[in-house]
Amino acid sequence: MSEVVANLAAVRHAIATAARQAGRDAASVSLVAVSKTHDAPDIVPVLEAGQRCFGENRVQEAKAKWPALKDRFAGVELHLIGPLQTNKVRDALALFDVIESIDRPKLARAVADEMGRSGLRPACCIQVNTGREAQKAGVDPDQADRFVALCRDEFGLPLVGVMGIPPADLDPEPHFRLLADIAARNGLAMISMGMSGDYPAAIRLGATHVRVGSAIFGARS
């Protein structure tokens, strides 16, 4: 068994364990295997092991490797988890099944306009900057409810959830609770939170999707 396949099995086991300890069905938590910066040959063993949900940060990088992989492996669900520039919206909608990083009105409008033009309607999440960090994308938590309403009512986006990345140097649990609360009061079913270092805690606090990269693929290229 290759190292990445062994890592994948270990992560799946840890997800199931965390879910069971939280009194949840393991099937209620989806693993988004974060394949950013890793080339197609590194991803193939994970696909061959049955993983079908993947996350990428950059549209251009994903465009270079995923169309061929999607042709080869049926049932792939590709998530955009990095910032989306408005000039990349058309390519993003053509490639991704879920866009997790809707974070500003200008982008929401551009996505809605392209959906109207193309007829493509990937599921969308709003990204919340729970730590209010200047270097990170995401709507301020205090503006999240208003932004959800804008995306739904004015732009008609197929909004399904929230996504967030807690500050690296702080306890992530208050940030996970904040995201879960925003999702609950807005009737959003998908909560994308938790990464390689903290996904068991995220599962305990309600994550439906965990984004795990280095624990599967190793250090980034």
Image: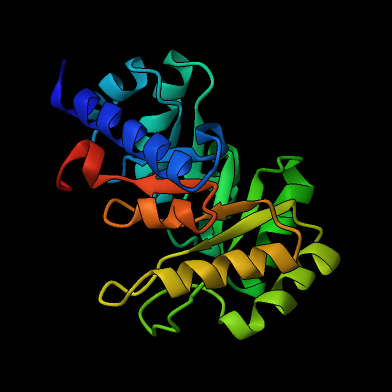
Tell me: residue 168, above or below residue 29. Answer: below
Q: Nearer the viewer, residue 94 or 144?
A: 144
Instruction: Specify how the rendered protein is coloured.
Output: rainbow
Indicate left or right for 214 with 98 as reference. Answer: left
Point out residue 52 in the picture as x, y percentages from the top left corner.
45, 26
Instruction: Using residue 148 as the reference point, say whether residue 84 is left or right of it.
Output: left
Q: Residue at x 54, y 55 (%)?
A: 206
Say which of 66 and 200 sits in front: 200
Residue 31 percent across, percent down from the top left? 43, 38
Q: Is 29 positioned to the left or the right of 133 in the image?
A: right
Report whether 216 appears left or right of 221.
right
Residue 34 x %, y %: 35, 43
Q: In the image, what residue occupies the spot 58% across and 80% down? A: 141
* Occupied quadrant, residue 107: bottom right
Residue farthest along the right direction in this orientation: 153
- Which quarter of the figure is the N terminus placed in? top left
| Count of picture labels | 0
Would you say residue 55 is visible in this rendering? yes
Please report the residue visible at 41 percent of the width from the left and 66 percent of the height from the top: 165
Task: State whether residue 52 is above or below residue 79.
Answer: above
User: Horizontal and vertical percent for residue 136?
Assistant: 40, 75
Q: Quadrant of residue 109?
A: bottom right
Q: Is residue 81 visible?
A: no
Query: What residue appears at the point 40 percent right and 48 percent down from the top-left corner?
Result: 211
Q: Nearer the viewer, residue 33 or 29?
A: 29
